[in-house]
Image (cartoon, helix red, strand yellow):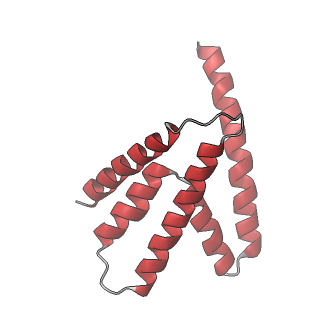
């Protein structure tokens, strides 16, 4: 049953992300992606903060909003939450390494994926 909540939330998050991408913006800077990532980070922070303050929040509700909607909207929000969680747990070195490795390996992954596509195409 939990998969259904994640799937429904993910669909909603993906639609919201797509809707933002339709906003006409004339700039080379990826402002809409930046906005999406920041809004996603605020949303997942709000959800986690609210759940920590409220009792009896259904795990399926959390899955719908946190994993589904935020995950479908932007996984950057999850990355940001995990980094902050490491820092809040006083694991500063681990948090820093996580940030550096995530950014570096994701950039490298994009590069490798593009190169692989040119080899196959």
Which quadrant would residue 9 be assigned to in this image?
Answer: bottom left
* Viewer-closest of 42 and 104: 42
Q: Residue sitting at 61 percent across and 74 percent down?
A: 85
In the rendered view, does 5 fall on the left or right side of 53?
left
| Residue 20 visible somewhere in the drawing | yes
48, above or below 37, in the image: below
- Residue 78 visible in the displayed image: no
The answer to whether residue 113 is left or right of residue 16 is right
Q: Residue furthest left?
A: 1
Query: Left of 18 or right of it: where is 60?
Result: left
Residue 4 figure quarter:
bottom left
Image quarter hosting the N terminus: bottom left
Residue 31 rendering spot, x and y as whole percentages = 65, 44
Q: Residue at x 30, y 84 (%)?
A: 56
Residue 77 at x, y percent in the picture: 55, 59
At a point 70% along the width and 76% down the height, the residue shown is 91
Name the residue at 75% across, 74% down. 92
In this rendering, the answer to whether 60 lies above or below 91 is above
Residue 54, given in percent of the width and then of the height, sits at 38, 85
């Amino acid at each position: 049953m939990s998969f259904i909540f994640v799937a429904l939330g993910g669909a909603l998050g993906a639609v919201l992300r797509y809707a933002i991408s339709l906003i006409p913006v004339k700039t080379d800077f990826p402002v809409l992606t930046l906005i999406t990532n920041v809004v996603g980070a605020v949303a997942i922070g709000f959800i986690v903060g609210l759940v920590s303050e409220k009792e009896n929040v259904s795990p399926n509700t959390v899955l719908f909003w946190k994993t589904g909607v935020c995950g479908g909207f932007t996984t950057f929000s999850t990355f940001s939450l995990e980094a902050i969680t490491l820092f809040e747990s006083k694991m500063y070195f681990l948090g820093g390494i996580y940030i550096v490795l995530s950014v570096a390996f994701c950039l490298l992954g994009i590069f490798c994926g593009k190169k692989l596509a040119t080899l196959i195409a």
